[in-house]
Amino acid sequence: MPKYPTEASSAAISTALDSLRAEVLRRNPGEPEFHQALNEVLDSLAPLLAARPELLDAGLLERIVEPERQIMFRVPWQDDAGVTRVNRGFRVEFNSALGPYKGGLRFHPSVNLGVVKFLGFEQIFKNALTGLSIGGGKGGSDFDPRGRSDAEVMRFCQSFMTELYRHIGEHTDVPAGDIGVGGREIGYLFGQYRRITNRWEAGVLTGKGLGWGGSNVRAEATGYGNVLFAAEMLAKRGEDFEGQQVVVSGSGNVAIYSIEKAQALGAHVLTASDSAGYVVDEKGIDVELLKEIKEVERARISEYAVRRGGSARYVSGGQVWDVPADVALPSATQNELGADSAATLVRGGVKAVSEGANMPCTPQAVEILRENGVAFGPGKAANAGGVATSALEMRQNAARDSWDFAEVEDRLRTIMRGIHDTAYETSEKYGAPGDYVLGANIAGFERVAEAMTAQGLI
Ligand code: NDP
């Protein structure tokens, strides 16, 4: 018997959503980031559920909010002084209705189960939006690679993989990078996987080096993709990146390649940051210098101002959102752009905000941007280029093939346009044109829900 008759009233829908929210909070206490990500999705679903009340049946929502599997493990390793350290490892395999679990690994002291669950939950809908065959998962550890030697990072990665290897595989679960996990870490992780399993299984990890199974454009993909998404939002308003003033936060993988692509499209990018402060460069960020400092030397962003000379200044503490701009690309971490910063951006005349990071804008900030008519691209749509290119890497691995830079970038461009159009058209269909949050959540949810329904009660 269906739980809800065909014309589910809006009262019945909100009761169902509220009781689900309460139940998730009760069963997952102390996980504010997960609650925040969940609320953002549930807040978008009412119009879909009104049109398709059958989606309230068969415990579909109840199943989607519960990970299929959550793995937590001990990661012991020895530092250079011979002291034994113990970190905690996580892998949350959230949903495999559309394909093998797919999502990055984050190494950062702030990582805990709730953070991994928020990221894994977002990943389900993001991956669905790409239209590719990938489920959602995420993992990581509270290990802090900052200030650690290469040898320490290698020993940590080897220990982490010594447990993780039994849970992953090219047809099961395919991790990649995220904060604190770049090409170096993926290399150590892949080496240990290969050693333990005695298999050259390239498709088990993505973000690999170009000489050993990696894909062209994977390093650039999240940042490039976010700028391509923002360009589509601007195009809807009859504008492009040419001559726009842009502020970017972060100075890691996503930030660097957001800056590179925005500049390639003619924008003037003024800022980059790390957790200690930010730089403003009136001449525009010198992306090669930034790469040298952050990717090669792994130094702090303050070093950029020292080397760049007159045009750049370093601001200790504070946030890049204080710098007036036309476009803002938050590309560091969750909840880095709050209500006050959103109001400051609006006062500075911002037209578009596109999330390179996952959930960098608080719900209050999103509300302020929305009320002021700012085009807002949520991370699950705007930063999906990274995971989409990971899926292209898996495809190349499966075919033992390698595509050139232009071919992969071309596919990335098509995918980002597709994600933008799907989110936009869905927002129109459900009566909120231009609300990319609603459009992305509904379109991603619908695809997963249909696959789960077709596959029965599992
Ligand atoms: P990186 O580790 O390469 O860079 C992270 C950047 O963010 C650094 O500049 C770091 O500064 C800053 N940062 C991290 N944590 C904090 C914090 N608590 N407060 C202030 N600044 C902080 O990570 P990525 O560039 O890969 O990831 C950035 C964001 O993009 C994350 O939200 C991630 O989930 C998301 N993302 C990444 C994808 C990818 O392909 N890499 C794909 C999709 C989303 P510091 O060095 O001082 O810590």
Image: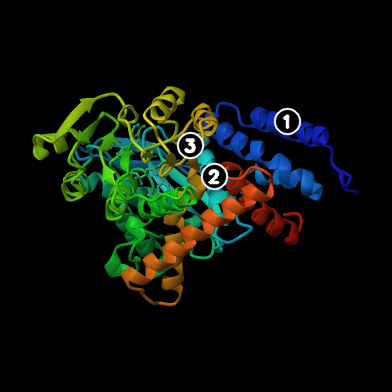
- Foreground residue among 13 and 189: 13
Instruction: Answer with left or right where residue 100 lies relative to residue 389.
Output: right
Toward which corner of the image does residue 216 lie, by quadrant?
bottom left
Q: How is the image coloured?
A: rainbow
Label 2: state its secondary structure: helix
Q: Quadrant of ligand 1?
A: top left
Circle 3 packing at 10 Å, graded few (<14), some (14-19), many (20+), is some
Pick the residue in front: 92 or 245. 245
Amino acid type for the residue under numbered disc 2: Glu
Q: Residue at x 56, y 63 (%)?
A: 133
State the CA–CA distance, disc 3 to disc 1.
29 Å
Q: Residue at x 61, y 53 (%)?
A: 425
Q: Is residue 20 visible?
A: yes
Q: Secondary structure at mark 1?
A: helix
Residue at 61% across / 45% down in the picture? Answer: 433
Foreground tag (2 vs 3): 3
Residue at image point 33% right, 35% down: 325
For mark 3, give the secondary structure. Answer: loop
Q: Earlier in the sequence, mark 1 or mark 2?
A: 1
Look at mark 3 in the image and give the residue it sits on: 374
Q: Position of residue 246 (x, y in %)?
A: 32, 41
Check disc 2 and report the residue beneath it: 122
Residue 49 percent across, percent down from the top left: 75, 44
Q: Quadrant of the C terminus?
A: bottom right
The residue carrying mark 1 is 18
Tag count: 3
Vertical comparison of 173 with 280: above or below: below
Ligand 1 lies under 8 Å from the Cβ of mark 2: no
Measured Cα–Cα span from mark 1 to mark 2: 20 Å
Q: Amino acid at mark 1?
A: Asp
